[in-house]
Amino acid sequence: MTEPSKAPEPFLKPYNSAENEPKILELWEKSGFANPDVCIEKGVTAPDAESYSIVLPPPNVTGTLHMGHAAMLAIQDILIRYHRMRGEKTLWLPGTDHAAIATQSVVEKNLLKTEKKSRHDLGREEFLKRVEEFAQASHDTIVGQVRAMGASVDWTREAYTLDEARNVAVRTAFKNMYDAGLIYRGNRIVNWDPKMQTTVSDDEIEYVEQKDPFYYFKYGPFTIGTVRPETKFGDKYIVMHPDDARYKEYKHGQQLEVEWINGPILATIIKDQAADMSFGSGVMTITPAHSGIDFEIAQKHKLDVEQIINERGILLPIAGEFAGQHIKKARPMVLEKLRAKGLLVKIEEGYVHNVATNSRGGETLEPQIKLQWFVDVNKKFTIPHSEIPGIASGSKTSLKEIMRRAVDSGAIKIAPDRFEKVYYNWIDNLRDWCISRQIWYGHRIPVWYCLNCKYEAVDADVKSKWFLVRHGETEGNVKRITQGHQDTPLTEQGIAQARTAGEQLKNQNIELIISSDLGRCKQTAEIIAKATGAEVVFDAAFRERFMGDGEGLTYEEQEERFSPFKDYDDRTEGNMETTRELEERVSEAFAKHKKIHGHKNVVIVSHGGAIRWLLKRIKNLTFDEARITKVAGNASVQSLDVLNACTKCGNDLFEQDSDTLDTWFSSGLWTFSTLGWPLDYAQGKPKTGTDLATYHPTAVLETGYDILFFWVARMILMTGFCLGTVPFRNVYLHGLVRDAKGRKMSKSLGNVIDPLTMTEKYGADAARLSLIVGASPGNDVKLSEDRVRGYKHFANKVWNISRFVLESCADLHTKADAEIGHGVSNLEEADNQLIAETQEIASVVSEHIDNFRLDLAADTIYHFVWHRFADEIIEDSKTILKGADEAAALSRRYTLNAILDTSLRLLHPFMPFVTEAIWQNLPAHAGGQAGLPQKDSELLMVAKWPSYNS
RNA sequence: GCACCUUUAGCUCAGUGGUAGAGCGUUCCGUUCACAUCGGAAAGGCCGUAGGUUCGAUCCCUACAAGGUGCACCA
């Protein structure tokens, strides 16, 4: 700061953002000032300064950033730079989100398009590898974009929602909630996506309006209406309102036989308020397995619930002649049949209703009853520690109460405040949150089931992993012959399968491979050994069932001659091994090896039959269960986890739940999982001196209003539960960025404006300002390229103002104090007023920023700089500077410098690049020289903010 | 069905209990001397409609209309 002044580098005439921005970026990044620790180290921030922190809402690694992200980055960077300049300990923590379903579905689509394969073709490990590669590429693109916007995030603290540290947080949170009884597994009706084969949470549903014919059918003495006759095969309850005078002759529980789709049905009358007397005939039949409301009614009256449609949208046997049909195809056929039976009363065309679709892919959702994991939002639990006003430590509360209290107590303020109502409304309608997903990309549910007794071990320690692998496809498999102890070599396909298995096992730290000594297993085991580097030993006890005279026959011949699976002890031919004997042989060998090698990660390569009967023992199945269980395909890998002995039955073999957690489960932990929880947290509080202690709760959560529920509410829930506090003091919701006509930007409309294109064409400063000015909180912004261009002009204006001031005041910077003889004390009266006016602008700008009115703050400084400073003050100064009154000229020069200095500081959070570029061109003044404003820092980024009011 | 938001100049939006402002656009004028990515000037609005409160309303209240969003329903 006090080094001798360098001659200012000549300003090039028009401001060139493309040339300047990379240089400035490098300067900032090299300085390390985005990291608050560096700021303290270098004396920019006082060690005991107040903290100000924001965690960046992590963008999904599904592709690239859009204008909405750009707006988010601009807003947060303004807040961060402002607070950093005010000398606060300022942290902006970046990261990305694995976005489970969204990312997986993008990769699945690509895979299908480029390789015509499904994820199942690749297997879990290989598929996940592909997703990771894709996510990494997206991540790198995103980081590049975030940097290009000038976002002063602290990359040294970057986090990913699916990395190891976050996994520890997820497992800990899960375990704590499970232990508190808030996470449970149950059969409940969920939103099922038949295409993606997974559940979807209530919030991910997007209702799409659809017009369909509405059919009325005769159902005994009643008329019922429906859009979906194909779901009504099992409808045997008829529901009516208890007060409906039309049906008062019918009593609750009364039964009557009615003619229905596939013949007569015994129907039962149910009286329930749920029936709307004014809708249609006021009578409805219910399909509890495929409708949330119907399910509720069924539960209330303890009615039978029968599944009609399977997970793929195919009708089940209950549909009689329609079984096996897809529901979409079945509708006209069912309709036709009902018409033929004379049960169709009438058709009303153009009935408008909403259809639930998956917002991540658009497929129509089918309610299904499934065994899933849920978070209970209503259950009371004892909260050990709470700082939330109105909820005492040690008191009974519920997650819903935490969410409500956190906001209505004022602990969290939502801006604009009208969203508080929306928030409460959402809480009131909140049901238990289904957190399990049948997809692969995500945090695996940290629950292990004891294979023997099904006991649930939560967040257990896996001591070692054992894998059962069947050999690859053989010539015998192709010919469909019973191989037994005879052998045939692997086919090409079989060798490829074995390699895939090797790939899958490569990263599992395999220490030993135990294989059947038959050639097909030997061959498979050796391929796997090559991939994993593990030693192979052979054990004849893992051979296939000995089939005696049956060996070499085709399956059909075998079946015909011996009925080999008729029962457990069947030994149709004297020399054939029974299944019981096989089970004994294989299980004994397995137990023996596990006793010796239990601490190692082991692969066992064996045969289809051998694995089947081994699993019968391990999983404690009956003969019939084992017989129908699907066993490994060729070279498929089955994983068993060795844990501490089950507390219930003493068995040590477990299987981890194959599902993953809803992406919002990990996102909900974001503010504290990024700051060191749970490692830096003990006894109800963060350890002293850690990031968690310093930066949590964060100052503000800034995001689009469209994810208020998804995310904001869940963070409040999770933080309340895990820390007994709030994740942030303020929520600031910005609007969505739309096109000039107010439409959503979408690829299909072709109206997407890419932030990177804008920064390249007009500069990051212009792109940022265009998203700030005129964007009042919570209201959508209409963006057009013209707007961005307009702010590029402003950047240039600021550049030229600076050129003028520096050029006309050049001598001030070179002359010594004494020569000039002027100081702050004896300015002309007019100049004192100008400086006061500038200071007033500084307080107005500060106040607007403090109130989250960045639009007004930006507008204020924009107008001051252009229309007051440039158009009036500078224009008036021209005559003064050229005038004969030297004292007045000198005073004005000082004043122009001062106004420029303040303006640059005020502008910096909004347009960091051009202001920093100018700052770098400013001469470094010797201390006190000519009373000029102090260039108090090499970088404007950490210079002092000019106003400290408010 | 229930909420919420919006309605101000051609467009995009600020705004205040004392009858209105910006940017862009339009028109005209201007270029040696920071900037044509510029400067100067002008035109353009009964502040959605109807009531009410008030000395006075664009601003507060009520109703309505149009547009939008969320939630619920959807047999």
Image: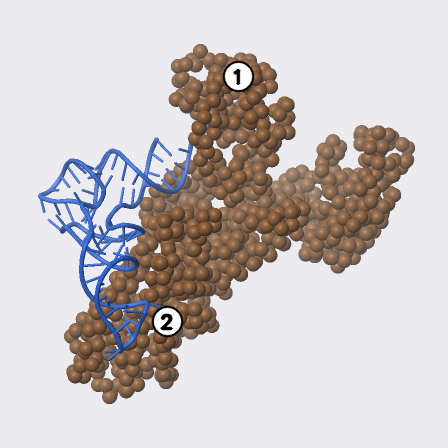
Q: Residues within 10 Å of mark 1 (few under 14, many from 20)?
A: some
Q: Residue furthest top?
A: A249
Residue in the image at 39% along x and 61% along y: A767
For the colour brown, the matching chain is A
Q: Position of residue A735 (x, y in %)?
A: 37, 50
Question: Residue A317 or A83: which is nearer the viewer?
Answer: A317
Quadrant that contains the C terminus of chain A: bottom left
Give me the residue at 82% from left, 35% from top: A555
From the image, state the color of chain B: blue
Q: Quadrant of residue A634?
A: top right
Q: Residues within 10 Å of mark 2 (few under 14, many from 20)?
A: many
Depth check, front residue: A212 or A71: A212
Question: The disc numbered 2 marks a residue on which chain?
Answer: A
Which mark, residue A111? none
Please report whichever mark, 2 or 1, sits nearer to the chain's N-terminal start.
2
Badges 2 and 1, same chain: yes
| Secondary structure at numbered mark 1 | loop
Kindly identify which numbered label has been placed on residue A15.
2
Q: Mark 2: which amino acid?
A: Tyr
Above/below status of A23 relative to A254: below
Res A343 label: 1
Q: Quadrant of the N terminus of chain A?
A: bottom left
Q: In the image, is A819 to the left or to the right of A628?
A: left
